[in-house]
Amino acid sequence: MAGGMTRRNGPTMAERVGATAPRRGDDARHCWVVDAPGHPGRWPGLLLEWRREDDGWFGRVAYAIPDLDRQGARMIERWLPAQCLTAETAPPA
């Protein structure tokens, strides 16, 4: 076949994709964001996923901080180093 594709024994691409378990959306975990760069303090957050880079583990997290200009809150979503994240079960400081 064109592009170097050959017929192999085993499931087709469609069968493999169909066999993939759908995401249930319950992978997110509550956490504390502690002294994130630019946002000192301790904020409740939602850990969405992990990734490993050359310099360690990072978590993609969503958290809200006070927005003093608007008298409300500002939603933040960003990748943070693991040392800025702690388990949700830790008591507030």
Image: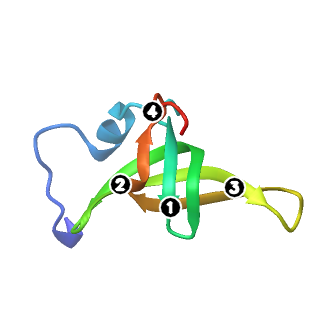
Query: Where residue 14 sits in the image (x, y, percent)?
Result: 35, 42
50 versus 56 height, above or below: above
Residue in the picture at 47% in, 54% down? 60
Secondary structure under badge 1? strand
Query: Where residue 9 sits in the image (x, y, percent)?
Result: 10, 40
Labels 2 and 3: the sequence-earlier one: 3
Q: Nearer the viewer, mark 4 or mark 3?
A: 3
Residue in the picture at 82% in, 63% down? 68
Secondary structure under badge 4? loop
Extreme left residue here?
9
Query: Where residue 84 sits in the image (x, y, percent)?
Result: 42, 55
Secondary structure under badge 3? strand
Q: Nearer the viewer, residue 91 or 71?
A: 91
Numbered badge on residue 36: 1
Q: Nearer the viewer, residue 6 or 16?
A: 16
Labels 4 and 2: the sequence-earlier one: 4
Q: Which residue is mark 3?
A: 65
**Distance from label 4 to label 3 (Cα)?**
32 Å
The answer to whether residue 74 shows anywhere in this view is no
Amino acid type at image mark 4: Pro
Labels 1 and 2: the sequence-earlier one: 1
Extreme front residue here?
93
Labels 4 and 1: the sequence-earlier one: 4
In the rendered image, the quadrant that contains the C terminus is: top right
Do the CB atoms of the residues marked 1 and 2 lie less than 8 Å apart? no
Q: Which residue is mark 4?
A: 22
